[in-house]
Image (spheres, rainbow, N blue to C red):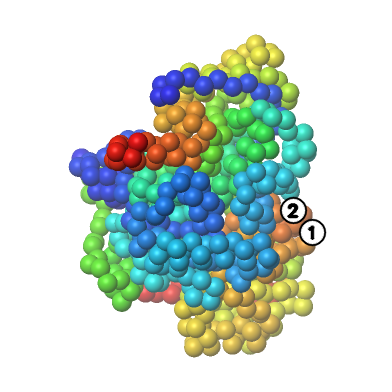
Amino acid sequence: MPGGSLTLRGRVRALLGDDIDTDMIYPGRYLNITDREKTAAHLFELAYPEIRAAIQPGDVIVAGKNFGCGSSREQAAAALKFAGAGAVIAASFARIFFRNAINLGLPAVVSPDAAPLCSLADELEIDLGAGEIHNLTNGRTSPSAALDPRAVELLAAGGLVPYLKRKYINSRRETCPSTE
Amino acid sequence: MGMTLAEKILARASGCECVAPDQVVVARVDLALSHENADLVRKSFLEIGVDRVWDPSKIVIVFDHRVPAESEKTAATHKAVREFVAAQGIEHFYDVGRGGICHQVLPEEGHVRPGMVIVGTDSHTTTHGAFGAFATGIGATEMAGVWMVGSLWFKVPSTLRIEVEGEFRPWISAKDLILHIIGRLGAAGADYRAVEFDGPAIRRMSVASRMVLTNLAMEMGAKVAFTPVDEILLDYLRPRVAEKLEMIAPDADARYERAIAIDAGEDLWEPQIACPHSVDRVQPLSALGDVPVHQAVLGSCTNGRLEDLEVAARVVAGRTVHPRTRLIVIPASQQIYREAMRLGFIETLVAAGAIINPPGCGPCVGVHQGILAAGETCVSSTNRNFLGRMGSKDSLLYLASPAVVAASAIAGQLAHPVSLVKQSEPCLVEA
Ligand code: SF4
């Protein structure tokens, strides 16, 4: 759905600071877990175990600058997604984490203004296409960087794997129409 | 208009005449690197439903994070990847005991050339910019896409230029330089950017020391980092690479987002230390006072090379590791291990009380071979000191140069080598 919109709602489950690194999000000792669903059990295990305990489906994590810095481990984004996070909003993201999140279908939203306008448990409505975050609890709106249409497309497909799957099957149809 | 190195390489790889920062291009990938997380890539790849990888000669897989397998889980992962490698006919696979740390093995085995586009499922893939490659880390699912089509989209980064001149003081090395830079720019100081290191002080450095800069540039968020392609580099590459080597350089009128000048002699008076729990919390050694050390780690893709083992051997020769301290040494590759044995560095280190781990990542990522207990302090030549990185979340991890790691192991606390070795010698191995 290029150029389309994608809106989600969720409650602020955590308000975090700058430079939340991937070792905090998902400790290195669990990197031999390669079933994505199972990574959720170790989300923030050393740094903020209370988040893992409290997170509900659709919850939003709000953070400061450089969220996801450090390792390329995809488990960091997977653990957030499979623990139920609906989105991560940060003032900025480290580049590999950002790509991993979108590729796994986890919305990563850049908004330098969101954190000061949120409190824990506030309900947010995030319009990914338009680049707006509405705080339904306090009525405030903060802008977010509009997601690249390519990223919106990936999120709408549920991530890179389902996206490529579809594309691959379609391209096979294109190249060998006789098999259809 | 002139182009930086990153722009030049991306322009060519995407078939464009000229590219500029923020433009999105689809570039062909020349080499795709993975380690144990090839298992994650494999899973996504099979999930997409493709039968064959795009080019089995362009994928390199190196086991390094957990060698030899430390658990049944890892053993099963290793096995699954071996079987996939065989089934797909992947040509370059370095199993346990055949290679070492992926970022060392890649250049050592001649896989890296100037001008290449390299992606790796490891953030420190930036290391290969020391060989003039546009090399960056990506996630496993994205790599599955690369295995499928052999190309990837990139946003062209803007470039920071860091010019270094002056002479390094005795015992001050590339590690101190890059920690100093990260301390100045911050952990996000080069986010999404390319970094070009250049200047007379860089051009005098060994290839191993240049790799320290491009490796740690990742810790300030760099997408890619380069050191110059010059004769010193070509001398390293020639015996290893069959293909023709190309001199590449940024254009004289290339546009930089920012230029930073550093004088190694004036700006770096003493060893630089990254304090817990962030790589940009950098202090000069003397500012830290007495910091007792329980474990000292010498190794990793940052500082596990021959010149690192050499300087450590020089510091510990004829001395003994402090009773409260454990010194763990990990040669970065089998080749380095053999050379260090031949030259007597291993003998000297073991005689001083070091334990030698097999080539690989060792305790760097906190899975095995030297995990820290709560309340312990470690000084390490590695590149990350995040909370709990090497074990307990209640341990403290300081990052330092190989010379400081070795001196601290002997002193039992953070120490300047000059406090032990009276006759000070330059610690950089001149090329
Ligand atoms: S040595 Fe450490 S930083 Fe380097 S690749 Fe291995 S785990 Fe990563």
**Residue B63: image location, x then y, percent:** 53, 66
> Which label is found at residue B234?
none
- Residue B219, compared with residue B63, is above or below; it is above
Coordinates of residue B54 in the picture (x, y in percent): 35, 53
- Name the element at disc 2: loop
Q: Label 2: chain?
A: B
In the image: residue A44, left or right of residue A96: right
Between discs 2 and 1, the one toward the N terminus: 1
Q: Secondary structure at mark 1?
A: loop
The N terminus of chain B lies in which quarter of the figure? Answer: top left
* Residue B354 percent location from the top left of the image: 66, 79
The residue nearer to you, when weighing B352 against A178, is A178
Label pair 2/1, CB-CB below 8 angstroms: yes
- Name above or below for residue B268 compared with residue B239: above
Looking at the image, which residue is at 60% across and 32% down? A88
Is residue B397 visible to us here?
no
- The amino acid type, in three-letter code, at marker 2 is Lys
Q: Which residue is mark 1?
A: B374
Say if A137 sits above or below A171 in the image.
Answer: above
Residue at (56% x, 34% y) in the render: A106
Residue placed under numbered mark 2 in the picture: B393
Q: Indicate the chain on which mark 1 is placed.
A: B
Specify whether B321 is left or right of B189: right
